[in-house]
């Protein structure tokens, strides 16, 4: 429990920042289709008014945040999705889009709480799918930023207003929490893995072997961090 608390409180802090971010908003964006433009190809593809988009290309949709991310990963202009229509799930194949519409949900205490958790869940989903996309090769090393790149992004957002800064802070905090829980040596998740092994087999992994695993993992993480930092610095200089 103690090992997991650091990452857990990162996730809780991210949730709190999301709540602060949403507090001033008078209405929330919705994943429910409000209306179509005349001759919209998405309507001709089978999408209907009042459809609630719950899945895109096999990825669960919690809010418009991860809906936008899911759309950026679509190739060929056609999307397979699952919508909730009249209380039932309906699968739609090869839905095409040439425009987008936003529908405002009236803000109440209930919708505020629901939107806070769904937005935080979206941040978690985007972090997870971003990692998968990176590992699968969909994105290259140029899409990764370290402390230097993140600081530059935060500085750019801070120059604008707090409204732009808070979502980045929430995403970074949630990202840190999720990453620390991954079963990577030298991170909290790696230590949790050894604890789980001990719980299952009722016998701890010999300390010398665990120390070697964490040392190798730490060295690899430091090397990766140096690589990303060098890339970020070069990007700033070149830019």
Image (spheres, rainbow, N blue to C red):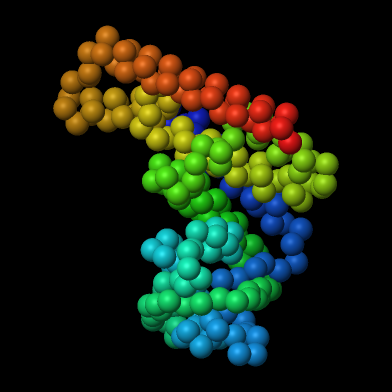
Q: Is residue 1 visible?
A: no
Q: Along the horizontal axis of the image, is 105 left or right of 81?
A: right
Q: Quadrant of residue 192?
A: top left
Residue 172 in the image: above or below residue 197: below
Q: Position of residue 44 (x, y in %)?
A: 51, 88
Q: Position of residue 124 (x, y in %)?
A: 50, 49
Of residue 83 and residue 13, the one placed in the foreground of this image is 83
How many dots with numbers?
0
Q: Along the horizontal axis of the image, is 200 left or right of 16?
A: left
Q: Position of residue 109 (x, y in %)?
A: 65, 64
Quadrant (top left/top right/bottom left/bottom right) for the N terminus: top left
The residue depicted at 42 percent of the width and 35 percent of the height is 181
Residue 63 in the image: above or below residue 233: below
Q: Which residue sits furthest top?
A: 208
Of residue 162 and residue 80, the one placed in the foreground of this image is 80
Q: Quadrant of residue 205?
A: top left
Q: Quadrant of residue 104?
A: bottom right
Q: Is residue 171 visible?
A: yes
Q: Which residue sits furthest bottom?
A: 38
The residue depicted at 83 percent of the width and 41 percent of the height is 159
Q: Which residue sits furthest front?
A: 238
The residue depicted at 47 percent of the width and 77 percent of the height is 95
Quadrant (top left/top right/bottom left/bottom right) for the C terminus: top right
Of residue 15 and residue 91, the one placed in the foreground of this image is 91
Residue 27 in the image: above or below residue 91: above
Q: Position of residue 51 (x, y in %)?
A: 51, 81
Residue 195 in the image: above or below residue 116: above
The residue depicted at 65 percent of the width and 86 percent of the height is 37
């Amino acid at each position: 429990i103690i090992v997991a608390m650091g990452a857990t409180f990162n996730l809780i802090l991210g949730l709190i920042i999301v709540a602060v971010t949403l507090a001033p908003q008078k209405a929330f964006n919705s994943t429910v289709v409000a209306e179509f433009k005349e001759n919209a190809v998405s309507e001709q593809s089978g999408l209907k008014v009042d459809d609630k988009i719950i899945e895109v290309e096999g990825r669960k949709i919690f809010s418009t945040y991860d809906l936008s991310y899911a759309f950026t990963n679509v190739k060929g202009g056609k999307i397979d999705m699952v919508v909730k229509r009249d209380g039932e799930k309906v699968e739609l194949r090869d839905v095409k889009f040439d425009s987008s519409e936003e529908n405002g949900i009236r803000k109440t205490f209930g919708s505020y709480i629901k939107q806070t958790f769904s937005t935080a869940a979206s941040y978690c989903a985007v972090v997870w799918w971003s990692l998968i996309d990176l590992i699968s090769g969909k994105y290259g090393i140029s899409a990764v930023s370290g402390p230097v790149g993140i600081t530059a992004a935060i500085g750019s957002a801070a120059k604008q207003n707090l409204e732009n800064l808070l979502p980045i802070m929430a995403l970074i905090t949630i990202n840190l929490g999720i990453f620390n829980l991954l079963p990577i040596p030298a991170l909290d998740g790696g230590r949790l893995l050894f604890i789980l092994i001990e719980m299952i087999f009722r016998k701890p992994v010999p300390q010398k072997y665990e120390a070697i695993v964490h040392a190798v993992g730490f060295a690899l993480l430091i090397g990766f961090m140096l690589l990303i930092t060098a890339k970020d610095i070069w990007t700033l200089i070149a830019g």
